[in-house]
Image: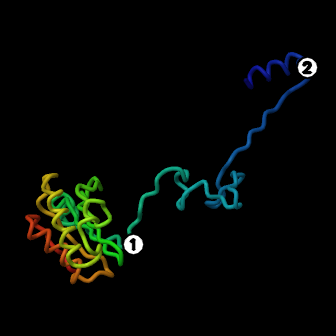
Amino acid sequence: MLKLAYHKLCSHGGGKLRCCLYAQTSGFHRGQPRLAPRSFFGVEDYLDDDNSRPYTYKKEKKSKNLDKHVSFKQRTVAYMEPFTLDVFISKRFVSASLTHRVTSKQVAVAGTNSKDIKAVLKSRSDIPACLAVGRILSERAREADVYTASYTPRERDKFEGKIRAVVQSLIDNGIDVKVYLD
């Protein structure tokens, strides 16, 4: 395209007209971009922190502690104990699920909000409701060929009362649950 325009200009003007093409260049001066396209906010953010790659590339996460070593157990625990138990208890209902750690898919779910459990229970958030959720979750887990799970309570949860009832009901109905209390 530029060659064609150049030849047309040169053919009309003969040897007298000499055309010059200017192109915007970008360069670096003391590590700072010069003549660079600016972003919406006026900050030159088209390069990452160390000015090596455009911002569209995925940046590598830099560890704060460079001497930190990830142990073999930390790397393999997701594969050795692939299923985790998640229990959520509110004032109105109880729900629990077994999730595969690697694929993040829920294998079995039970809760007192489902129609089949809701009709049978008097209250949806008391201890008998927690026992029923554990029993139904264990049946659904055995249908999916899951017989072991691990459970780590959330920071705000104590392992007592209703949460303990759900876990104990799972253990009583044939699911081996390892509880990690930190």
Image location of residue 90, percent across then percent down: 35, 76
Please tell me whether mark 2 sits on a helix, a strand or a loop: helix
Look at discs 2 and 1 and give the one toward the viewer.
1
Q: Quadrant of the C terminus?
A: bottom left
The three-letter code of the residue at mark 2 reads Gly
Residue labelled with disc 2: 13
Q: Are marks 2 and 1 in contact (CB under 8 Å)?
A: no
Q: Quadrant of the N terminus?
A: top right
Query: Which colour scheme appears in the figure?
Result: rainbow
- Between marks 2 and 1, how big is the CA–CA gap? 65 Å
Q: Which mark is residue 107?
A: none
Residue at image point 42% right, 58% down: 60
179 and 2: which one is in front?
Answer: 179
**Mark 2 vs mark 1: which is more N-terminal?**
2
Image location of residue 97, percent across then percent down: 26, 63
Image location of residue 164, percent across then percent down: 19, 78
168 and 23: which one is in front?
Answer: 168
Residue labelled with disc 1: 64
**79 to 161, vertically: above or below:** above
126 and 103: which one is in front?
Answer: 126
Q: Quadrant of residue 177?
A: bottom left
**24 to 49, vertically: above or below:** above
**152 to 12, vertically: above or below:** below
Residue at image point 35% right, 73% down: 65
37 and 164: which one is in front?
Answer: 164
Please tell me whether mark 1 sits on a helix, a strand or a loop: loop
- Total numbered labels placed on residues in the image: 2
63 relative to 105 in the view: left or right = right
Q: Quadrant of residue 147?
A: bottom left
The three-letter code of the residue at mark 1 reads Lys
Label 1 neighbour load within 10 Å: few <14, some 14-19, many 20+:
few
Image location of residue 163, percent across then percent down: 23, 77
